[in-house]
Each structure stands twice: as C-alpha cells, then as structure tokens.
Amino acid sequence: MFIGEVIGSVIASRKTENMASLPLRIVRRISVDTTPGETYLVAVDVVGADNGEMVLVASGSPARQTHLTDARPCDAVIMAIVDTWQTHNQVQYTNAATD
Amino acid sequence: MFIGEVIGSVIASRKTENMASLPLRIVRRISVDTTPGETYLVAVDVVGADNGEMVLVASGSPARQTHLTDARPCDAVIMAIVDTWQTHNQVQYTNAATD
Amino acid sequence: MFIGEVIGSVIASRKTENMASLPLRIVRRISVDTTPGETYLVAVDVVGADNGEMVLVASGSPARQTHLTDARPCDAVIMAIVDTWQTHNQVQYTNAATD
Amino acid sequence: MFIGEVIGSVIASRKTENMASLPLRIVRRISVDTTPGETYLVAVDVVGADNGEMVLVASGSPARQTHLTDARPCDAVIMAIVDTWQTHNQVQYTNAATD
Amino acid sequence: MFIGEVIGSVIASRKTENMASLPLRIVRRISVDTTPGETYLVAVDVVGADNGEMVLVASGSPARQTHLTDARPCDAVIMAIVDTWQTHNQVQYTNAATD
C-alpha cells in the first residue's frame, strides 16, 4: 500500500455498468515525511474519506478484495483512512479528526 | 486507475482469437492539471470513447473484469469516459459533450 | 498493452517443464511515433511474429490468458501483430506485409 | 521480492473490516549493498518484524498468499525476516540477532 | 520476463511457513547487450541456477505458476536458465556451460 492524500474527485456517467455508484477519488502520493509527491491516481473509495485526509491505497489485483470492488475493473482502492504514522519512533502525521 | 486522453487506434488482424473484435485504442496519460504526459499505452475500449475524450484506464489483472475482456490477454481497459474532475475544489476538466 | 518491436530470441533449455516449447522473443518498446525505446523484455510469442515486426504485448497476470500460456509462469505475451496504428488521425506505422 | 528495512508503523482505525487487526509497517527499500533507498511502502507484517530489521516484501497479488492476508485488499506483505545475504560471495548484511 | 544474472543469495529462517525451503536468490537485471543494470530483486529459484548464470525471471502473479511457488507469497521466480540470446541476428550471450 502507499500513503496518499485525497485531493479531488472524478465524475464519469458513462462507464461499465459494474462500476456504477462507486466513488472515484483522486489521490496524490505522499512521502513518509509528508512531502507531497508528483504521482496521482484515481481510486475507488470504500471507506468514505474526506478531501485532505491521508489514506492507504491498495493497487492491482488486491484492489478487488472488498465488498464494493469485487469482480470490478478497479485497480486501486482506498481501503483505510490513516490516523497517524511514525518512522524511527517519531510521529510524522496525525489526523486532526483523531488527534 | 489513471486519467488519459484517447489519441488514436491500433489495427491488428493477426492476434489471439480471444482478442477478436475488441477495439484497441492508444491512450496518453494526462496529469490532474490536464497537462499531457509522455506515457502511452494501448487499451481495450469497452465504453465507446471518441478521439480526444478523457477516460479512465484500469490496468493489470482488474482489466479483465468486464464482459468484453473476461478471460482475455488484456492488461488495460478503458472502463469510463470522464465527465469532469476537480482537485482542491477547483474544476480541472469538463467534457464539452456533457458541459 | 504496449507496442513493441521484435528484435531477437532467447534459448533456454533448462526451464520449468510447463514452459517447454514456448518461443521466447526479445521485444523493444516503441513510442507511438515509432521511436525505439530503451526498455526491453522477454515475451512468449503465441502469434508467430517475425523479427522486425511491431507487436502488442500484454503483461502481468493477463499474459496467461491464452491457450499456450495458461497456468504457466509467463508474465508477458505477444498477443497481436500490428498492421497499422494512427494518432491524431495520422498514420504512424503500417506493416509492410499488410500494406 | 525486494529487501527492505522496517522503519515505522501506520495506525488506521477506519478501514475495510477485512483489514482489521493486521499490523501495517512502513518499509524502506534497501540496495543489495545496504544503501537505503528513496522508495517506501506500507506492508502487512505477518512475521513480527522489529523496527530496524531487514525483511523481504512480496508485492501485488502474491501478497495475499498468507493465512492473514488471504482475500484482503493487501498489495504488500512482509513474508520473511532476513538473517543474512551475500552477493559475489561476500556477506553484505547479517542480522545482529542471528549473528 | 526479464533477463538477469544471479549474483547472490538471501537466508531468512523466520518466514511464513509456506515459503520454507524455497531458495531465495538475488538477481541483477541485465540489458540485452549484457550491460549490468542497477535493478535488483529477490526471486525464488526453481531451476537450480548457479551464481553468475543468466536467467529469466517472471514477476507478479505469474510467479506462482510453478509446482514450488503455487499458493505462496512469491512475486518473482527464476523459471529458466538462459543458454543464449541474440538480437538483430547477432549473438549477445552464450552460457559457457552450454557453449
């Protein structure tokens, strides 16, 4: 998984029927020291993340291993909202909502 | 998924029989601020996208999760035509046809 | 899929038994404007491509979705020989054999 | 697989239910000469690695092939703690705990 | 698949039980003109390659398609030892043992 920040949304009314009603969010990759990266992707959000929240994204075939994404052409899923992370015993980030 | 622009097509009459009649489109990766990227791939189009339209592409094993691509050697599928996307609450792109 | 040019072959007599007799070709990635790239891989050829021909390669798990590669440790397959491709309504390449 | 060093942890209380109670560790990629890399990811730890230990990470669909990660949206798993590795017949690293 | 050179081994006594007794080799990626690359990975060896031998590595989900790696968290497998390869009708490499 990688850590990302939810920065936007995609609306697509014309799509394969099995993707109907799945929320599509734009996620920017974030470094472990919270520096924003230059990599973006579109992921299905199955946990209800808000804009600006840090999330975990699972990619590839494992992205289908949720109730909402099973058997769908989905290659990236937001499967967790991050509360906090630490490296080398230092807190790098804490979600204000869970602070 | 990533956002891309349909820029062309590939014709291949000699191919594995289970790829017969699947339209092959050339898709250029697009940044979230609509800057064209330097990455291209060939994807099966299952939604009928036109040249110049912005689309979502699912890659890898999930690309087989549509009626048309099931059980086929297809590693990329256009599974949605984008109406609009926004980042940081600003609209970055709106499809003229749905404007 | 990506567009590549068949530039060579690999011979490997010692391999897992389920890869026996599958032709292994070296494919160089080609840009949409036909510029040769610096990326190479080895793919199983299930369509009988000749040296110098432009082909489509499917990678990852989908590479196993052909009769010859099913249930084999094959992560790249040549599944089509390209006749022609165009971008922005301009022909970029036409196979001399199908011209 | 790649060799990495466990450098931290992620806490995420809001996640898909099938990821509950799986420990999420931050792993930094390490070169074969033990130089730390600039690539990080978040992996499920199924072997109980400590901070600072060198581990092996399996990515993609194979990351689900453990009792703890089966049928979960997990695209990276720490599946081994490294005792030692050598290249060109020279030991590059030995785990102090197993030295 | 990609062409690589076996340059070392990893020993890991603490690992998921289904990885027990599988030999873990360090493989360096090799260019088609035999130039050593800067990319390394750890692969399960199912064909008994020696240090210094050129091999083919299959990655991702297909790496599980051998008797030894089936249903294991293995994302890279050495599935062939290369005898020789050629590009543009010139031999680039021949294994001394099979010369």
Image (spheres, coloured by chain):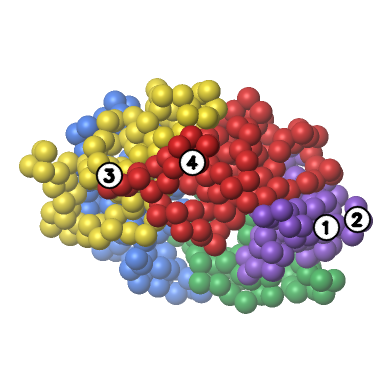
Chain colours: A yellow, B red, C purple, D blue, E green
Residue B81 image offset from top left, x and y in percent: 53, 37
Label 2, on which residue?
A: C99
Label 3, on which residue?
A: B89
Label 4, on which residue?
A: B95
Q: Are marks 4 and 3 on the same chain?
A: yes
Q: Amino acid at mark 4?
A: Asn
* Label 1 vs label 4, nearer the camera: 4
Q: Residues within 10 Å of mark 1 (few under 14, many from 20)?
A: some
Question: Are the residues at dot 2 and dot 1 in contact (C-beta closer than 8 Å)?
Answer: yes
Q: Are marks 2 and 4 on the same chain?
A: no
User: How far is mark 3 from mark 1, CA to CA?
Assistant: 45 Å
Horizontal relation, residue E65 to residue A98: left or right: right
Check residue C94 in the rendering and tell me which mark sits there, or answer none. 1
Residue D15 image offset from top left, x and y in percent: 27, 32
Q: Are marks 3 and 1 on the same chain?
A: no
For the residue pair B19 and E84, the one nearer the viewer reads as B19
Label 3: state its secondary structure. loop
Q: Amino acid at mark 3?
A: Asn
